[in-house]
Each structure stands twice: as C-alpha cells, then as structure tokens.
Image: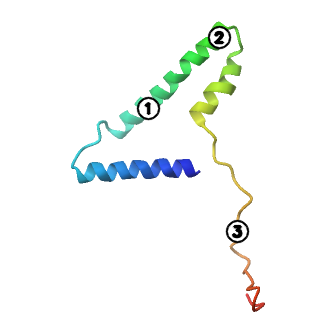
Amino acid sequence: MKIYLLSLGAGLLVGVIYSLLNVRSPAPPVVALIGLLGILVGEQIVPLAKSIWAREPAALSWLHQVKPHMFGPLPKGGLNVVEATSPRKDPTSGKS
C-alpha cells in the first residue's frame, strides 16, 4: 500500500508544480492513462511471444512475467487491526 501512496503523492506534487507554473498537463488524464496502459501491455508482448516461440505454455509466461509486472504485489489485509470498540487500560493506574 505504501508504494501506491508514494505514487499518488508524486502525482499530486507534479500537479501542484504544473499549477504554479501555469502549465497544462501534456495530455488529458484519460488519454494519458490509456497510453500508460498501452506501454504496460506492450512491454509484455515480447516475453509472451518468446514463450510461445519456445513452445512453452502461455500460462507459464503469464504467471512468471506478465501478471507480476502488470499487477505488482497487491496489498494484503493484515492482522494488525486495532479493535476500536474495546477501551485500553492504563497499565499504571489500572483505569480505562
């Protein structure tokens, strides 16, 4: 989750700098995102083609190259959830 927040923060910083310099972003957001998706998918065509050329199952390339690169490590729920409903006791006074 940290990498997503860092990415969002970097984007916000660039947006603020663009605004201060009175510069518009080079492309409308949807166009830019579709272009980034094209780059990401295009990077995966060569490894997939190589695995097909080597007569390996396409699923092998998907599991070891395409999926980890395109989707990255997705955030997982943790067990470090603080229970908000139970009051915490002060160890020094014995009170809640």
Mark 3 to mark 1 CA distance (whole Å):
38 Å
Identify which residue is drawn at 55% across, 16% down. Answer: 46
Q: Where is residue 73 in the image (x, y as percent from the top left)?
A: 64, 41
Q: Where is residue 55 in the image (x, y as percent from the top left)?
A: 70, 8
Q: Where is residue 80 in the image (x, y as percent from the top left)?
A: 72, 62
Identify which residue is drawn at 39% across, 52% down. Answer: 12
Identify which residue is drawn at 71% across, 56% down. Answer: 78
Residue farthest toward the front in the current orientation of the protein:
92
From the viewer's side, name the closer residue of 91 and 49.
91
Q: In this view, does 11 lie to the left or right of 89?
A: left
Disc 3, SS: loop
Q: Where is residue 7 in the image (x, y as percent from the top left)?
A: 48, 47
* Residue on which the image places disc 2: 52
**How would you rate the neighbour count of disc 2 (Cα within 10 Å): few for under 14, some for 14-19, many for 20 or more?**
some
Type of the residue with mark 3:
Val
Q: Which mark is residue 83?
A: none
Q: Earlier in the sequence, mark 3 or mark 2?
A: 2
Is the C terminus in the top left, top right, bottom left or bottom right quadrant?
bottom right
Disc 2, SS: helix
Identify which residue is drawn at 72% across, 70% down. Answer: 83
Type of the residue with mark 1:
Leu
Mark 1 to mark 2 CA distance (whole Å):
25 Å
Type of the residue with mark 2:
Ile
Q: Which of marks 1 and 2 is nearer the N terminus?
A: 1
Q: Is residue 40 above or below residue 72?
A: above
* Residue on which the image places disc 3: 82
* Residue on which the image places disc 1: 36
Disc 1, SS: helix
Residue 53 is drawn in which quadrant? Answer: top right
**How would you rate the neighbour count of disc 1 (Cα within 10 Å): few for under 14, some for 14-19, many for 20 or more?**
few
Mark 3 to mark 2 CA distance (whole Å):
48 Å
